[in-house]
């Protein structure tokens, strides 16, 4: 009788363990699927970041080319540097050969 009870209990535990294994297997499959989706998303994001970095580099290079080819931009760059060093409107007008209105505007913009 005692052995029969033990056998019944062991059978019951075995069934519970098997059900638990089935549940864990289902959860494992779900998690594996989610991980796969995340990997795909991360790969897509990585490609997009690489594209954006490339575009940013191209824009930066183009800006440098434009700045180097435009003599007026050199004057404005010089004026900006003078403003950063504390130059006043009169100094900027003299050093960069800019009209008063432009010099005042630059001072106003750079000191904000």
Image: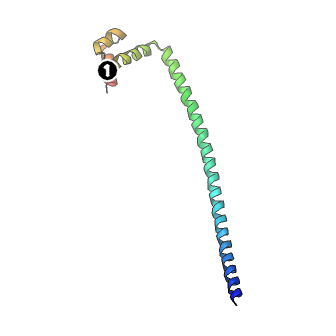
Q: Quadrant of residue 98?
A: top left
Image coordinates for residue 53, horizontal then vertical, percent: 56, 32
Q: Is residue 30 left or right of residue 88?
A: right
Residue found at the very far front of the displayed protein: 2
The local secondary structure at tag 1 comes to helix
Q: Residue at x 60, y 50 (%)?
A: 38
Q: Residue at x 53, y 26 (%)?
A: 59
Q: Is residue 58 left or right of residue 25?
A: left
**Display colour scheme:** rainbow
Image coordinates for residue 63, horizontal then vertical, percent: 50, 22
Q: Quadrant of residue 57?
A: top right
Q: Quadrant of residue 112?
A: top left
* Residue 63 position (above or below residue 52): above
Which residue occupies the foreground of this view, 70 or 1?
1
* Residue 37 position (above or below residue 24): above
* Residue 27 position (above or below residue 108): below
Q: Is residue 7 left or right of residue 56?
A: right
Q: Residue at x 54, y 30 (%)?
A: 56
Mark 1 highlights which residue?
107
Which residue occupies the foreground of this view, 103 or 36?
36
Mark 1 is surrounded, within 10 Å at the Cα level, by few (under 14), some (14 to 19) or many (20 or more) other residues, namely many
Q: Residue at x 40, y 16 (%)?
A: 76
**Total marks placed:** 1
Image coordinates for residue 14, horizontal then vertical, percent: 69, 76
Which residue occupies the foreground of this view, 36 or 93?
36
Instruction: Work out which quarter of the rendered image holds the N terminus and state it.
Output: bottom right
Image coordinates for residue 102, horizontal then vertical, percent: 33, 17
């Amino acid at each position: 009788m005692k052995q029969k009870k033990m056998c019944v209990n062991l059978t019951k535990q075995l069934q519970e363990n098997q059900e638990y294994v089935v549940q864990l297997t289902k959860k494992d499959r779900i998690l594996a699927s989610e991980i796969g989706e995340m990997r795909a998303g991360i790969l897509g994001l990585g490609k997009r970041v690489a594209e954006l970095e490339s575009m940013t580099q191209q824009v930066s290079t183009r800006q440098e080319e434009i700045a180097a080819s435009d003599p007026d931009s050199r004057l404005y760059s010089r004026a900006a540097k003078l403003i950063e060093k504390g130059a006043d409107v009169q100094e900027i007008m003299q050093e960069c050969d800019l009209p008063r209105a432009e010099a005042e505007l630059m001072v106003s913009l750079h000191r904000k």
